Amino acid sequence: MIDRTMMGPLTLALGVTVIGVVGVEVIGTLPGHPPILEALSWLVAMIALPGTVTYVVTRRDFGGRGAALATVGCVILMGVGAWLGFVFSFFAFFVAAAVYLVLRRRVRVGSALAISTVTFIGGLVVSVLAMARALDGMG
């Protein structure tokens, strides 16, 4: 469960996510803005919250180093998913997080992480395919 010590990092991550989304909108309105700034703001917005949630959820089960490795993996996958599949990667993340939270009570923690990782990657693949299908249908 989420206790008081986790509220600070989660609040910070939510704030960074909101600032990233607002940054995308503000940078997009500036005349002659470099597109890389908009892309980086979007990337920060898409990885801040899932990365922090991953660390908070896995810290108790894997300790500091294991949670950091899980977080790095999540951030990399979210970055790729956000780059290719827009916001659909959030859905894949939250489904995978729910799978992990349910399974860690039923099976070994390592197995729960492996199953949720496969779920996450599968969700990212589906989100990228959905985005490709949507873009193909536009033109």
Image (cartoon, grey):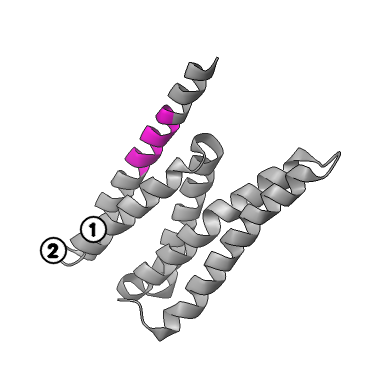
Which amino acid does the dot numbered 1 rest on?
Ala
User: Is 34 above or below relative to 41?
Assistant: above
**What residue occupies the far top of the structure in this picture?**
139
**What residue occupies the far right of the structure in this picture?**
32
Q: Judge from the rendering whether residue 138 lies leftward or rightward of residue 26; answer left or right.
A: left
**The C terminus - image quarter:** top right
Which amino acid does the dot numbered 2 rest on?
Arg
Q: Judge from the rendering whether residue 45 lies leftward or rightward of residue 119; answer left or right.
A: right
* Frontmost residue, 115 versus 12: 12
Q: Which residue is mark 2?
A: 106
* Residue 98 - label: none
Residue 49 image offset from top left, x and y in percent:
50, 61
Q: Residue at x 46, y 47 (%)?
A: 77
Q: Judge from the rendering whether residue 38 lies leftward or rightward of residue 34; answer left or right.
A: left
Q: Secondary structure at mark 1?
A: helix
Asked if the residue under mark 1 is in contact with the one under mark 2, i.e. CB atoms within 8 Å, the reply is yes
**Residue span colored magenta:** 121-130
Q: Residue at x 13, y 63 (%)?
A: 106
Q: Residue at x 82, y 42 (%)?
A: 33
Q: Which residue is mark 1?
A: 112
Give residue 6's quadrant in the image: bottom left
- Magenta-highlighted stretch: main secondary structure? helix
